[in-house]
Image (cartoon, rainbow, N blue to C red):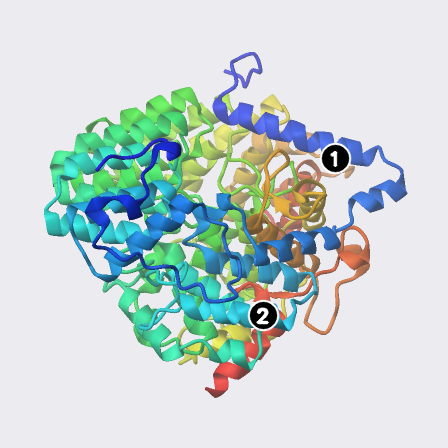
């Protein structure tokens, strides 16, 4: 028995070869260019990206009707991308955002996909993150926190996880969006947190990654959501972190970008969902070490405490401080993925020269991929930075240093500066 | 009440006598909305009438029809789907017809959360009457895209809630015959052997499953799915994984063939060593043979050697292998 190339390729093999062919064509072309031309290709097309983003904020074509129940997402994807680029939006437009999102806010709490729509956890997450990204008193005070809390309580299923909307689906995304919003608004409590960890744990698969529901396949989006949630509820030590790391490390392929699942295709959005997991892992090396040191470590429900991180399961912890303490803690500077390779994929393959970013060559640009490619790019640039006060070295930034984006908070995916402002604001309320 | 296919022929709702009593409710976007969508006329009108019946909580046949219209225009509007369920409940609507409706929408929207959630709701109400239909439906979707995440989730839910496990292991086998790289099929296989009430559970199935995965490994060593599956068979019992000679001999076999696909074999060997495997001389020899990093003396710590090799042959993960090397158990093996 041998792995002979003469047998007909399977669908997976064929799809993979086609993408590799396209991607390597771009890389081969790039490598053949003189240095100046190479520099130009690696440049982040800031101006064009801004044009594309601002245009979307102001008007969307009829084909966007299929996103009519996702308009807070459009706000977040666009505003977050703009903020990552270090740009801002005219005050009048900012006011319009706040005004519009207020109309998406349900009188009984939470935000829907548009005015008059039922509140939904994903659009609530998007709206809150968008308002935090706008920042300022008007924006932040427009969120009715008491009502959001009531909405979250209603969405909580008695068994532990959350439903996306009234009588909606339960999955790991719902857990993340609910807990993330609660944490960032300073309304997280034991009622919301109860049994969430059990559910997420049941979603970690035999592969090491995390699935959307128990039994489903390990997937990048859900892995990020599950891991980030466990951090926020202070139950990281229950996950098999070594297994998770091994799975996510293998999600970066020859194309240099990340795939969402084993044997599937590279996609620029996973630059954040998968790439972002490494930023989270950087602050849990002590738990990783503990799990690796024991002979049968990493199996099942580990309840080892982590004294060093201060994120200690056995000590009473202020749930609402976790997000803040997380980012204030120093990180291990060794990044365990290939940051420059990922940056190369984002800059050379995901960028649309005319503005915006796409999944992969051959696909069209969209705001979702623009947001998550840039978020992933930021993650890469800051992956070796020890703390906030040390900016990345030029050697850590692919292309001209002017490609440097703003730093994000890796749990919430909002620009760090904006997170701090929100944290201070909601701590006082 | 007809379902309009051609826009050109569509009679606006405002001109239909059976809607004359309803005042359409415009969207409250405000004077300066952001991310405003340039909706087509038909969309605006349909949604204005939907808002009206939704606000009035009118659970009538015409409202049901209107939700179908709205769904055709935007299958992602979860509010419309939710209201549709309320109407179906109130009217005690024919849920078998509903399955047909969903299948129709799914043709162009197979990756939409709302459709699948709605399908689950209908199937749950129909109970075991729906079992074979649901298995058939998901199979259809998977024939077009064998990795559709929603389809697999739904299929798993059907099996657990409604049953129908009889042919599932065989279905996995078929899919893997067609495409041994289909990780979703491997995942489903794991699901079946651990959860099926017709089989004995993971431990009982382990023997045959190890044989199956080792065969897959040897014929396609570059297939990550089978290696992870093999490891997964020993979840919760790492010691047995380390002690199962078939695992280390699969590594040996692949490494001996010395083709360009030894990364998973090396990675697996590394994990085995970290968990206490006492490597045979043959394993040592074949690894040392692969070590082209220039040292004359083979390192007594085989784990270190394996990491060094991986740093060279799996460049993308060089940082990871370097870190793994730094975390090797203290004892030299």
Please identify, in this view, whether the residue under mark 2 or under mark 1 is nearer the observer: 2
**Inter-mark Cα distance, 2 to 1:** 39 Å
Image: A190 above or below B89: below
Residue annotated with mark 2: A94
Q: Which image quadrant is residue A196 in?
A: bottom left
Looking at the image, residue A331 sits to the left or right of residue A159; the answer is right
Q: Is residue B19 visible?
A: yes
Chain letter for mark 1: A
Image: A375 above or below B258: below
Neighbour tally class for label 1: few under 14, some 14-19, many 20 plus, Cα within 10 Å: some
Choose between A17 and A385: the one closer to the eye.
A17
**Residue A398 rendering spot, x and y as whole percentages:** 76, 51
Choose between B91 and A145: the one closer to the eye.
B91
Image: A224 above or below A101: above
Tag 2's secondary structure? helix
Tag 1's secondary structure? helix
Choose between A365 and B309: the one closer to the eye.
A365
Q: Which image quadrant is residue A257 in?
A: top right
Image: B207 above or below B112: above
Q: Which image quadrant is residue A163 in?
A: bottom left
Q: Earlier in the sequence, mark 2 or mark 1?
A: 1
**Residue A111 rendering spot, x and y as whole percentages:** 39, 66
Looking at the image, residue B257 sits to the left or right of residue A264; the answer is right
Residue at the far top in the pictured view: A6
Residue at horizontal 45 percent and vertical 38 percent from the top: B228
**Residue A248 rendering spot, x and y as whole percentages:** 53, 48
Choose between A252 and A182: the one closer to the eye.
A182
**Residue B238 rendering spot, x and y as whole percentages:** 41, 46
Neighbour tally class for label 2: few under 14, some 14-19, many 20 plus, Cα within 10 Å: many
* Labelled disc at residue A27: 1
Chain letter for mark 2: A
């Amino acid at each position: 028995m041998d792995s002979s190339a003469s047998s007909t390729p399977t669908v997976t093999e064929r799809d993979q070869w086609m993408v590799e062919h396209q991607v390597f064509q771009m890389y081969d072309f790039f490598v053949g260019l003189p240095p100046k031309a190479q520099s130009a290709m690696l440049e982040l097309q800031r101006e064009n990206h801004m044009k594309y983003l601002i245009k979307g904020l102001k008007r969307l074509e009829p084909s966007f009707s299929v996103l009519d129940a996702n308009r807070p997402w459009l706000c977040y994807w666009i505003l977050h991308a703009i903020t990552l680029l270090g740009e801002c939006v005219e005050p009048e437009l900012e006011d319009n955002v706040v005004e519009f999102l207020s109309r998406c806010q349900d009188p009984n709490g939470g935000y829907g996909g548009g005015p008059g729509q039922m509140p939904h956890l994903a659009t609530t997450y998007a709206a809150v993150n968008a308002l935090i990204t706008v920042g300022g008193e008007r924006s932040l005070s427009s969120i009715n926190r008491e009502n959001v809390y009531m909405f979250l309580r209603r969405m909580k299923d008695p068994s532990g996880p959350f439903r996306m909307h009234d009588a909606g689906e339960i999955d790991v995304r719902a857990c993340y969006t609910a807990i993330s919003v609660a944490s960032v608004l300073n309304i997280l409590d034991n009622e919301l947190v109860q049994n969430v960890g059990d559910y997420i744990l049941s979603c970690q698969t035999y592969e090491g990654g995390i699935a959307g529901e128990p039994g489903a396949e390990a997937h990048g989006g859900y892995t990020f959501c599950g891991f980030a949630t466990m951090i926020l509820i202070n139950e990281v030590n229950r996950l098999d972190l070594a297994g998770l790391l091994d799975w996510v490390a293998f999600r970066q392929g020859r194309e240099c970008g990340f795939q969402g699942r084993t044997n599937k295709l590279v996609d620029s959005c996973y630059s954040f969902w998968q790439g972002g997991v490494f930023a989270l892992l950087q602050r849990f090396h002590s738990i990783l070490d503990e799990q690796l040191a024991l002979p049968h470590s990493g199996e099942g429900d580990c309840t080892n405490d982590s004294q060093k991180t201060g994120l200690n399961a056995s000590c009473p912890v202020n749930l609402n401080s976790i997000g803040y303490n997380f980012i204030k803690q120093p990180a291990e500077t060794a990044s365990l993925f290939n940051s420059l390779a990922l940056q190369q994929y984002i800059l050379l393959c995901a960028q649309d020269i005319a503005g915006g970013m796409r999944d992969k060559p051959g696909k069209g640009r969209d705001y979702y991929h623009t947001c998550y490619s840039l978020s992933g790019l930021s993650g890469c640039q800051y992956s070796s930075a020890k703390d906030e006060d040390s900016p990345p070295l030029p050697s850590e930034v692919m292309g001209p240093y002017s490609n440097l984006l703003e730093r994000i908070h890796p749990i919430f995916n909002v620009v760090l500066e904006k997170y701090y402002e929100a944290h201070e604001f909601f701590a006082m309320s | 009440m007809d379902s309009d296919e051609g826009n050109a022929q569509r009679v606006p709702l405002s001109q239909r006598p059976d809607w004359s009593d309803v005042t359409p409710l415009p969207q409250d976007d405000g004077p300066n909305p952001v991310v405003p969508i340039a909706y087509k006329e038909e969309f605006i009108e349909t949604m204005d009438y939907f808002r009206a019946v939704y606000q009035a909580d009118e659970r009538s046949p015409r409202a049901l029809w209107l939700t179908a219209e709205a769904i055709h225009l935007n299958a992602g509007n979860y509010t419309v789907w939710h209201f549709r369920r309320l109407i179906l409940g109130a009217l005690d609507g024919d849920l078998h017809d509903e399955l047909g409706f969903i299948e129709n929408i799914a043709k162009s929207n197979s990756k939409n959360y709302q459709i699948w959630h709605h399908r689950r709701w209908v199937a749950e109400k129909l109970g075991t009457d729906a079992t074979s239909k649901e298995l058939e439906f998901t199979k259809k979707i998977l024939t077009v895209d064998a990795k559709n995440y929603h389809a697999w989730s739904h299929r798993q839910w059907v099996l657990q809630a409604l049953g129908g496990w009889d042919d599932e292991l065989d279905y996995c086998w078929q899919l893997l015959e067609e495409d041994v790289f289909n990780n979703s099929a491997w995942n489903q296989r794991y699901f079946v052997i651990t959860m099926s009430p017709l089989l004995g559970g993971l431990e009982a199935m382990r023997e045959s499953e190890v044989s199956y995965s080792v065969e897959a490994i040897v014929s396609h060593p570059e297939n990550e799915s089978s290696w992870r599956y093999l490891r997964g068979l020993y979840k919760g019992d790492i010691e047995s994984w380390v002690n199962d000679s078939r695992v280390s001999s699969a590594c040996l076999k692949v490494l001996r063939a010395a083709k360009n696909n030894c990364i998973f074999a090396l990675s697996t060997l590394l994990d085995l060593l970290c968990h206490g495997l006492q490597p045979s001389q043959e394993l040592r020899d074949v690894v040392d043979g692969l070590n082209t990093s220039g040292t004359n003396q083979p390192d007594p710590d085989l784990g270190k050697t394996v990491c060094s090799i991986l740093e060279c042959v799996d460049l993308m993960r060089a940082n990871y292998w370097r870190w793994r090397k730094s975390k090797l158990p203290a004892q030299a093996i």
